Image (cartoon, rainbow, N blue to C red):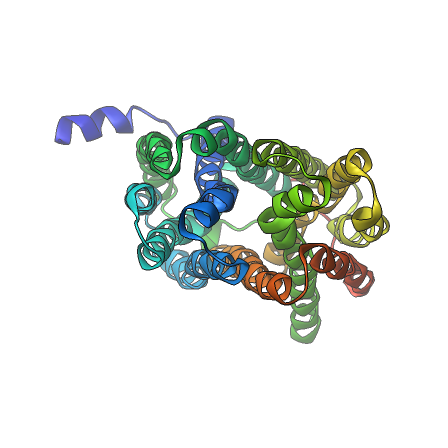
Amino acid sequence: MKSILIKLKGHPHVQKGTAYTILFAMGFCHLLNDMIQSVIPAMYPVLKDNFGFTFAQIGIITLVFQLTSSVFQPFVGQYADRRPQPYSLSAGMCFTLTGLLLLAFASNFFLILLAVAIIGCGSSVFHPEASRVAQIASGGRKSLAQSIFQVGGNGGSAIGPLLAALIIIPYGQHAVGWFSIAALLASAILVRVGYWYKLTLSQTGMSHRAQQTTSCNLSKKAIRNALIILVIMLFSKYFFISCMTSYFTFFLIEKFGITVQQSQLCLFAFLAALAIGTLLGGFLGDRYGRKYVILFSILGAAPFTLVLPYLNLFWTLVIAVIIGFIIASAFSAILVYATDLKPDKVGMISGIFFGLMFGLGGVGSAFFGWLADETSIEFIFKVSTLLPLLGIIAGFLPNIKPSNR
């Protein structure tokens, strides 16, 4: 066992500047992590058919998964700000592995809830410390690092439904066990990343807090108000996205009569647009300012979301891709903007915002599931498309000069 760990650690070295190898490794592991997570909503049609779940039960599954993915993240991040844990990333993937195997063979609603809760705990451990590692590896280029890290996650979210359409839909619930290979691969890579992280901390002889290179000169009140606005932006973005990721397939099947596999491919197109938009948002945030990227990303998507429920199949797909492309650019800008407001608490801020991302998504999915049972799938899309209009309040964010160091 010891010899295996030594081989996994490899012989990484610490260098000055941006550590692209580490950044791409983190982006790839984020891809694998979020690919696994996206399999859960992608397999909802299978679970609904196998167990006869209502839309409310589908929403509860998402709620449990998203809450366990979110509740622990701020505490993990706060603890890591004081005591970084280099190998916690790999340990988190072991939670994910356990949850996947349980989900593959779960035979009732309770076991499914337990499985997604364990997978959520793995994600809760992964994201805050992974975001910290990305910022350390950035060499000061935080927007670039966050974009590389985040686009990996969005890419994984896009691939998940595609693989579900190819693997889980044809072969059933047990086929989800094959995704445990991805968890094992990510865990192995993260052992090496953890060793590099440990070397970096020991060689610099500094805590992560001492390594921060930016500062914010705003008053405490201005910082608090800015953070509140950012939380509202997350609410509008992820309530809308939760409706799309959880119920877009049902909407397409009900309105246009397409097959489950065809609907999964349509969801893949939307999630792929999210991945591309995320990378673009990071670069634009450095160049033009994160405030304007946030404003454009949320409010700019509103004209397209408002017409989405009233189009034919072709234009529904085209507009959904455009919406995904525009609205995705917000999260990287929001997170880096928030860490610029609190540069000495990167772990805690990352944990809070990743936690809110998952938590709001879970609450949104449960809410729209309940509303769909009470009304219709088409009705919840008409309601959810109003949410990006909240983006107008991003105009009240104070201007912070982007840091390119």
Q: Quadrant of the C terminus?
A: top right
Closer to the camera, 51 or 345? 51
Q: Does 64 sit above or below residue 324?
A: below
Residue 24 placement (x, y as % from top left):
50, 29
Closer to the camera, 59 or 277? 59
Q: Is residue 50 visible?
A: yes
Residue 320 left/right relative to 210:
right
User: Residue shown at 29%/43% (left/top)?
Assistant: 105
Residue 190 placement (x, y as % from top left):
35, 35
User: Residue shown at 34%/44% (left/top)?
Assistant: 96
Residue 362 left/right relative to 379:
left
Residue 125 placement (x, y as % from top left):
38, 52
User: Residue shown at 13%/31% (left/top)?
Assistant: 1
User: Residue shown at 47%/62% (left/top)?
Assistant: 60
Residue 270 left/right relative to 155:
right
Q: Does 213 sit above or below residue 30?
A: below
Q: Is residue 214 visible?
A: no
Residue 399 left/right relative to 202:
right
Q: Give the mark count.
A: 0
